[in-house]
Amino acid sequence: MAQRIKREDAVLVVRGKDRGRTGTVRQVIPDEQRVVVTGINIAKRHMKPRPPQQAGGIIERESPLSWANVRLICPACAKAVRIGFRSLDDGRKVRYCKQCNANID
């Protein structure tokens, strides 16, 4: 299955506690169909101190969320859109915006 969301993509969260917020994708976990978005879905973790340099305490970090809960923001039309795939004349497979019909890759 081809990946619709990739690293460094700008996305809009459409479901969950952070609905309506935007961010960039920091990591994609394809086996679990999840993405980590910078500044979105912040969770607090209680960490033990690890010697010698890391301190313990309550640490805030981004948690993965389902990639079904985010929409790609098209760079051409600046809207949260659905993505399709097409093959170019030179044989490359690229993503395209289904609203403005512009190539994304």
Image (spheres, helix red, strand yellow):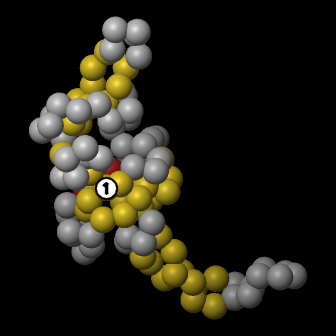
Q: Where, quadrant-wise, is the N terminus in this rendering? A: top left
Q: Position of residue 25 (x, y in %)?
A: 43, 55
Residue picked out by circle 1? 11
Q: Residue at x 21, y 69 (%)?
A: 19
Residue 101, by quadrant, is top left
- Residue farthest to the right? 52
Q: Is residue 76 left or right of residue 1?
A: left
Q: Position of residue 61 (x, y in %)?
A: 51, 75
Please say whether residue 64 is visible from this viewpoint. no
Above or below — where is 13 with respect to 94?
below
Above or below — where is 87 with respect to 47?
above
Going by the numbered disc 1, the residue's amino acid type is Val
Above or below — where is 87 with respect to 22?
above
Q: Position of residue 96 (x, y in %)?
A: 26, 31
Q: Is residue 89 left or right of residue 82?
A: right
Please say whether residue 37 is visible from this viewpoint. yes
